[in-house]
Amino acid sequence: MKIEKVVYMDPTASAEWKTIEEIKTMTSAVCVAVGQVVDECPTFIKIAGSYSSYMDDVTQFADVNCIPKGCVLRRVTIHEENYSLDDYVEKNTNAKVTPIKPTKN
């Protein structure tokens, strides 16, 4: 699992009628996303702030950002280690999740 901080320009849009002068003053916000790199391709990086596997053995993600790589200003790896959610929980037969200590691969 790789945890990264991604600094990127957030595209800005407006549906209002604008003059050329107003359009020239439009700017874009600089955003920061921190999370697990879930997927990456030549065009996008997809990171999630949270993930969980609850009762049905299906890992789900929340706070997901799909960031166009053309908007990325900087990427910083915060943590990189070979482990997964299964290293932290074990499933009991009664479908309860019991925390366990992680083990390094």
Image (cartoon, helix red, strand yellow):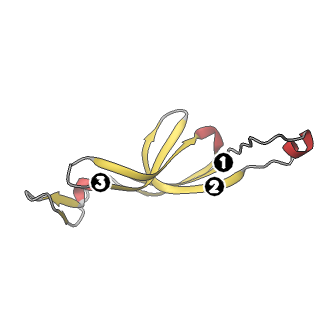
Q: How many marks?
A: 3
Report the residue at 21% width, 49% height from top: 57
Q: From what the image shows, is residue 91 above or below residue 45?
A: below
Q: Pick whichever of labels 1 and 2 is earlier in the sequence.
A: 1
User: Do residues under tags 3 and 1 come within 8 Å of each other at their CB atoms?
Assistant: no
User: Do residues under tags 1 and 2 come within 8 Å of each other at their CB atoms?
Assistant: yes
Report the residue at 86% width, 48% height from top: 25
Q: Residue furthest right?
A: 21
Residue situated in front as seen by the camera: 15 or 84? 15
Mark 1: amino acid: Asp
**Which residue corresponds to mark 1?**
10
Q: Quadrant of the C terminus?
A: bottom left
Report the residue at 74% width, 43% height from top: 14
**22 with respect to 98 (left or right):** right
**Which residue corresponds to mark 2?**
31
**Residue 38 image point, x, y percent:** 41, 45
How far, Cα to Cα, is label 2 from label 3?
A: 28 Å
**Residue 28 image point, x, y percent:** 73, 49
Residue 52: image quadrant is bottom left
Q: Pick whichever of labels 2 and 3 is earlier in the sequence.
A: 2
Q: Which disc number belongs to residue 83?
A: 3
Answer few, some or many: residues within 10 Å of disc 2's Cα (few below 14, many 20 plus, some between 14 and 19): few
Q: From what the image shows, is residue 17 above or below residue 101?
A: above
Q: Secondary structure at mark 2?
A: strand
Residue 55: image quadrant is bottom left
